[in-house]
Amino acid sequence: MLKLRSITTKIFLGYAAAVICSTGVMGFLFHTLTRHYMEARVARAMIRQAQTLAREMSREHAPPARVPIPFGDQVLEGDFVVTDREGTVLYGSAPAAFPPGIRLPHVLREGMPPPPAVLPRGHRDYIVAAAPLPPGEQPGGTMYLLLRRGAFEALSGRLFGIFLQSLGAGLAVSLIGAWLVARHLTRPLHALKEKARAIARREFDARVEVGSQDELADLARTFNEMAAALKEHEAATKRLLQHTSHELRTPLTSIQGYAEGIKDGVFSGEEAEHAAEIIARETGRLCRFVDELLYLARLESPHETYALEPVDAREILAAAVEGLGGYATERGVALVNEVREEIPLRADAAKLRRLFDNLLGNAIRHAAGRVVVSARRQETGGVTIAFRDDGPGFDLQDLGRVFEPYFTGRRGNTGLGLAIVRTIAERHGGSVRAANHPDGGAVVEVTLPPTPSPGSRG
């Protein structure tokens, strides 16, 4: 049973309407043109037969009771009427319809009727053709050949009936073909519906097979991309939960243990002060982790806004170096800023400062004793700022993953700092790269695009 709201039915009904309308128009045109063609052929055949009959009468042949009119492989039977110069019937083969002494209509007496001429007589119409009689037979007389229109209509109806049968068979085949085409066109949509239900059941491995290059194939490919993105999102969510629970469990366990020890009197004096310091340190670690987690989530939100304005990245970098100078001194690391020239950029100053803070803090944490910050211009007009430390460098197997959220390599911290760096750089239209320096240590390079000219759009 057809579901009127289904797209398969709608496509089929659209095809069916088009096929039926075109079939109807074709049938009407065929009937009209065929009828005109048959009338012209019958008229020509009647004229030839009238001329033949007129010649035979001049040879004193007895006129036939009925006149055969050949038409293709069919033979139609007609009647004849002979008139004088004035159009008065002298005799004929149909005395009941055309008795001797009646005068034929004026249009026929004016001359030969243009084929095909139709003459109404009683309850019947006659198709009329004429030929002049030879002068010796009946001066000015005319031979009229008459064919009942009903006989012609019967022949035309048989031919049109055959056409309608063929048309009906073709229409049925066309409608079956339209239904099959509609089913074929919507098969990917039905598959897409089933896969969408699978996605709703969180079966993110569901994929729609693509075997064409049309819009439905584009839709299927887009669906597959969505399914892959959802699968990756679910995996990222699981990693987030696992990493978050791990990052929270360790300090919370430590805080809980020391807090219960202080409450129960297990720690006293200097031990209690040491326990309080640990609680404060672990609490600070938790706050930093939660802060970075929320900040990364906000950065990755499509609704996060970037207040892009002309800034001097050199000044922001200098402020970051100054702000982390105490941390570097505490860890015994020399922090060297080799950037001297102005770096004009169009950027969000606060987010750019966060990017520099994260890279400097990461470099100081892994350095053996020295961190160097440098910058170089790109041929495209952009700038690359490099943060190099003299530590052990990246493990080769980790180089492709250091910017992934929650990835912690050797001596890693929360696994969010470099992910924040990448997100900020990419949202500014730039990029970030990690590598091991040939002379030892790690280097992280941030490339940012040039400042647009005043007349450019951005």
Image: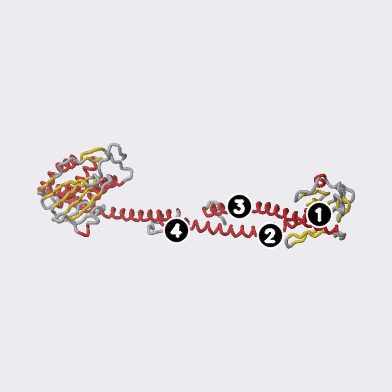
329 relative position to 452: left or right: left
Q: Which residue is mark 2?
A: 162
Q: Which residue is mark 3?
A: 22
CA separation in Å, label 3 and label 4:
29 Å
Q: Amino acid at mark 4?
A: Ser
Nearer to us: label 1 or label 3? 1
Precedes in sequence: disc 1 or disc 3: 3
Evaluate if marks 4 and 1 touch, with contact meaning CB atoms under 8 Å apart.
Answer: no
Precedes in sequence: disc 4 or disc 1: 1
Q: Residue at x 27, y 44 (%)?
A: 428
Is residue 264 visible to the viewer in this orientation of the structure? no
CA separation in Å, label 2 and label 3:
19 Å
x and y percentages locating residue 394 in the rendered image: 18, 56
x and y percentages locating residue 90 in the rendered image: 89, 51
Q: Residues within 10 Å of mark 4 (few under 14, many from 20)?
A: few
CA separation in Å, label 1 and label 3:
40 Å
Q: Residues within 10 Å of mark 1 (few under 14, many from 20)?
A: many
Is residue 240 visible to the viewer in this orientation of the structure? yes
Q: Amino acid at mark 3?
A: Ser
Q: Which residue is mark 1?
A: 145
Q: Residue at x 74, y 58 (%)?
A: 155
Q: Which residue is mark 4?
A: 212
Precedes in sequence: disc 3 or disc 4: 3
Nearer to us: label 1 or label 2? 1
Along the line of sight, which residue is nearer the eye, 121 or 230?
121
Q: Amino acid at mark 2?
A: Ile
